[in-house]
Image (spheres, rainbow, N blue to C red):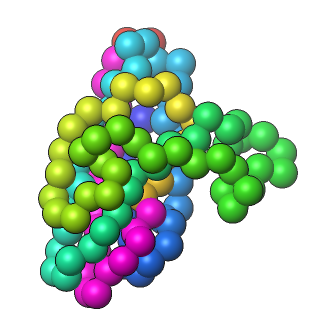
């Protein structure tokens, strides 16, 4: 996975990205930037197989990532070390603007 950006401009969930969960150690740098407004957002992950036939993001089990990514209201950055099969951002409330999340995966194949 190279550097990937996902964003959300309305309440709801973004499209998800699929990290390379075979890279060890699993480590993704995450940076969330808020432009305008005062959002409440959470970066979420799933262990469900996003590549399986019939996969539906709407019926997948999404989990809130650990702090500082759960219930965030401002710019934040950190590391994501939970091996997973999908990552997205879900905005609970947003008056204006965008939540843009940049993900950069590191590790050795």
Q: How many marks?
A: 0
- Please state the horizontal and vertical placement of residue 7, each as a whole percent of the image: 37, 66
Tell me what residue is drawn at x 30 percent, y 48 percent: 69
Left or right relative to 17: residue 65: left
Residue 13: % across, % down: 50, 66
Which image quarter: residue 8? bottom left
The residue depicted at 19 percent of the width and 82 percent of the height is 37
Residue lying at 40% horizontally and 20% vertically, measured from the top left: 26
Query: Relative to 40, is 77 above or below?
Result: above
Q: Is residue 81 visible?
A: yes
Is 106 placed above or below 58 here?
Answer: above
> Where on the picture, by quarter, is residue 89?
bottom left
Residue 22, x across and y down, in percent = 53, 18
Above or below, comparing residue 23 to residue 50 in the picture = above
The image quadrant where one finds the C terminus is: top left
Range of magenta residues:
90-107
- Residue 95 appears left or right of 20: left
Left or right: where 86 falls relative to 93: right
- The residue shown at (40%, 42%) is 65
Q: Nearer the viewer, residue 10 or 106?
A: 10
Q: Main secondary structure of the magenta part?
A: strand
Inspect the magenta stretch and tell me whether residue 106 lies in it.
yes
- Whether residue 3 appears in magenta in the rendering, the answer is no
As drawn, is 60 to the left or to the right of 18?
Answer: right
Q: Quadrant of the N terminus?
A: top left
């Amino acid at each position: 996975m190279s550097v990937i950006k996902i964003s959300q401009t309305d309440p709801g969930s973004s499209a998800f990205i699929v990290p390379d969960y075979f890279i060890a150690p699993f480590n993704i740098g995450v940076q969330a930037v808020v432009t305008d407004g005062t959002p409440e957002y959470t970066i979420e992950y799933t262990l469900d197989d996003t590549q399986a036939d019939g996969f539906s993001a709407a019926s997948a089990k999404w989990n809130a990532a650990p702090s500082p990514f759960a219930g965030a209201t401002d710019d934040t950055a950190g590391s994501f070390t939970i091996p997973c099969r999908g990552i997205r951002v879900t905005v609970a409330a947003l008056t204006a603007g965008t939540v843009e999340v940049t993900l950069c995966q590191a590790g050795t194949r």
